[in-house]
Image (cartoon, rainbow, N blue to C red):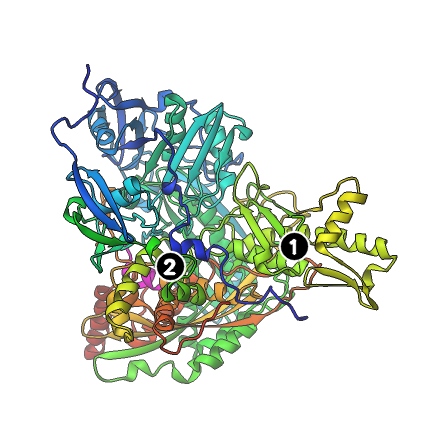
Amino acid sequence: MTQTHIEPTVRSRIIELSVNGERHEIAVKPRNTLVEVLREKIGLTGTKEGCEQGACGVCTVLLDGRPVLSCLTLAIECDGRSVLTVEGLAHGDQLSPIQQAFLDQGAVQCGYCTAGMLMSATALLERNPKPSLPEIKKALEGNICRCTGYNAIVAAVQQASGQGVEPVMR
Amino acid sequence: MTELSYVGKSLRRKDGPDKVTGRAVYSEDIKLPGTLIGRILRSPHPHARIVRIDSAKALSLPGVKAVITVEDTKGIKHGFVETPRYPPDQEVLARGRVVYVGEEIAAVAAVDQVTAQKALDLIEVEYEQLPAVFDPFEAMQPGAPQIHPTNPKIASEVPYSNVGGRTATGWGDVEGGFAQADYVREDRFESHLRTHGYLEPHATIAHWENDRLNVWTSSMGTFIKRAKLARTLDLPYSAVRVHKAYVGGTFGGKIDLYSHEYCAARLSMITRRPVRIVASREEIFSAYRHGQPLAMELKTGVKRDGTIVAQQIRVINNSGGYRGSGVVVIFLGWGFTMIPYRIPNLKYEGLSVYTNYPVRAPQRGHGCPQIRFAIESQLDAIAEHLGIDPVTIRLRNAREPGEALPNGGNVHEAGLIDCIKVAAEKSNIRERYGQGRRGSGTIRRGIGMGVSGYFGGSLIYPNGSGVIVKMNDDGTATVLTGGIDVGQGSETIICQIVAEELALDLDDVKIVSSDTDSTPQDIGAWISGMTYVTGNAARQAAGNVRRKMLDLVSTRFNVDVEKLMVQDKVVFNRGNPSQRMTYREIIAHSVATNRGDTILGEGYWRTMRDEPNHPSLATTKGRWSENYAFSCQVAEVEVDIETGEARLVKALTVHDCGFPVNPALVKGQIDGQVSMALGHAFLEEVITKDGYTLNPTWLDYRMPTIHEMAASEDADVITEQYVVGQPFRTKEVGEGLVSGILAAIANAIYDATAVRLTSTPFTPEKILRGIRKLERERRTN
């Protein structure tokens, strides 16, 4: 038996993807999701997988600036588009204000929701620099956190948007 | 407390930068060349005999590298506890019979996910279905389908079927106590099936290479995983290395050995390639271990002033298809009953009953939320009957500092009374309770109180923690600890303790953790003892380094150690500061003059050093812990009396935490537990029918989202202190604070609506049913 692959008729396609400002040419199968491609082919494991059903939000990345669930986004849909992941938030050693605020407010415990939360929060602050509490909740409603109860996460968004919340950790 | 620089400060997490930049490596992030994907074949039936398994077709599918069943194992059993009374009872793959939907029958390793899934479909299994039983009270009846024979040691004590565990204990004379009581009340409470909901799925990658097994797995303790893996694989412990990986939440659901961990390892040993197995979320909801649903029958007798005279409790656990931790939760049912209040006469019985469900695991609080919900609800009902307010009745019964516990332990510096007083004052509950019910309009507000106690560290394998602090010759320190950070911040607080002992900045203390090869053994992050046990081991290790350095300087300048001061990585003579050595100089001096001593400090700790063993799970004889935390929590809820929907608006947590090593991390634990409690109360339920899980997704198992966030206020009652160079007793804060809030929510709902709920979750249907029943009663009166 010379057959070595289970799907002889489904061929990969080459797509072009800009991830965190870097251009990649990747061979993907039609069924590959964006999160699989980011983690397995490009090697950026900061974006996590929690449920493969789009219900938890840990896989959130920004696609052309909009938060999407990368576990439900097909890689071939992203041909020619740009993706921002958690690895792209800092500039060298300089953390973004929201990353720094997560550290200052104790908004990180196990860290598994953190990447997705940061991406949703980043997109929020990009379009709404001073969000109200209901606006913060609306923007993060698709990101589940089991550790923090969300209190410190809300405080972090408020700190990052300069709304009078001081760091509680130093 | 003397002025401290690091302990007691809200310092930023050591692992924070890794986590906010995506650098933190979790088990699923490990990439090894040639990795195969593993998947598990699971039983579709709740109870069935396996007549025949044939994996020939699966094995011949191109891309499939190995298929295993129980015949490919050494047949060595494991269990959550392993004692003479409760020996290991579960094999890693089913042998001859399956006892729950989802039980592991076979495993495959293939070149990719799709091939592995197709291979599972090609494994032929012939089942003969057997009658199944799902309710523990039915399972106990003679003639019920037998899942396992009742434990022979228990069969002589009780006439029930399917009993996997029994705890029976007590003191005094309960019948006499009830006879003397002015008021006796009996109630039945039920808690439901809910689950941990950790965001990181179970993930394991195992690589057998050069006669050694390298494993990365999401866990609560690398040493217990190593022990159980090694034993079931029949390998020496030294042949198994469980590596450090970040962990994405656990809450009790990642302690025991899981079949997929064994299978990844065994498949790797057969294929000689790394094998990765990651559970799907659907698998986790439907086949992995959830928390324990308890039925609690509670009878309490009190004097007219509310003082408890006698209490009789029976707890029945719906244990699932194997013993699991069910035999522990029925022991803890007693423990969590007896810590906070004085109970002169007690009779306790706990039964852990087999049912055709997946095995259960501890879930944050391990019985405490259920027990305190029952006891605190009943206590409020008793108080109302006697015309006493909820604060007063609790103050009357609360244990005082230094009180001896009936099992030979002592509550030591118990701050419960202060917790209740502070909670009462801050919440103003005495003025506010009873008001909600009199409201008009559709939204009623209620306020309720709940008291709890929790233990910090007990004896269960591996029983003790070791820590090594090694100085680097530039004067910085590296800590080696087996202690695992599952999100609670253990790496940070261990570094804070070392930093305090050595007067080093936190940046000058690096930590290597939870690697079974390179770090000392540790009790793990599942016995509420990390800060107390591992923390003291770290303190001792750093203290030994400090003493060595001081001795060197003392000898060098011929100055008494007491005259020396430590500051900014310099040791100097207080009376003559020109006599000074930097850490760098001290270490160089040590290497030069002390046979090359590079300055290492070792430390180790265990709880109850004079107690040889853990207490008896059967009789509770023996001391349980030497460290008890206490709390009083107040919940404010809103109930819509038209829809029955209720929500937690605000939680106040006043806790005797000893002293906080890192106040912000403590607050984080409290906030998370408030969230879990409100999920337990209002939102979460694993819904099953005939052993099948009907809602195996986060869309249907509703955990709190940001919209359900409650305001969370906390206040510390300080009862211990940290002194450099001395052992400390600070108290747990990661598990015991779910219970008081859950109990307080139940009492707050009653306050808002006069509906006394005796089962969780507190659904709109139950609340509406209660409201309508009260309306009918009012109309007929």
Q: Would you say the magenta stretch is mainly helix, strand or loop? A: helix
Q: CA distance from mark 1 to mark 2?
A: 38 Å
Q: Numbered disc 1: what chain?
A: B
Q: Numbered disc 2: what chain?
A: A
Question: In the depicted view, which residue is nearer to us: B635 or B200?
Answer: B200
Q: Is residue A22 in view? A: yes
**In the rendered image, the vertical position of residue B364 relative to residue B44, given as above or below:** below
Q: Residue at x 35, y 38 (%)?
A: B321
- The residue indicated by pointer 2 is A91
Relative placement, left or right, of B221 versus A52 is right
- The residue indicated by pointer 1 is B539
Question: In the depicted view, which residue is nearer to us: B255 or A117?
Answer: A117
Please give the label number shown on residue B147. Answer: none
**In the rendered image, the vertical position of residue B140 relative to residue B434, given as above or below:** above
Q: Quadrant of residue A90?
A: bottom left
- Residue A110 in the image, given as x and y percentages of width and height: 41, 54
Which quarter of the image is occupied by the N terminus of chain A? top left
Q: Are marks 1 and 2 on the same chain?
A: no
Relative placement, left or right, of B249 versus B686 is right
Q: Is residue B678 magenta?
A: yes
Question: In the depicted view, which residue is nearer to us: B235 or B544?
Answer: B544
Q: Secondary structure at mark 1?
A: helix
Q: Amino acid at mark 2?
A: His
Q: Which residues are magenta?
A: B677-685
**In the rendered image, the vertical position of residue B223 relative to residue B739, given as above or below:** above
Q: Is residue B447 magenta?
A: no
- Residue B438 in the image, given as x and y percentages of width and height: 29, 84
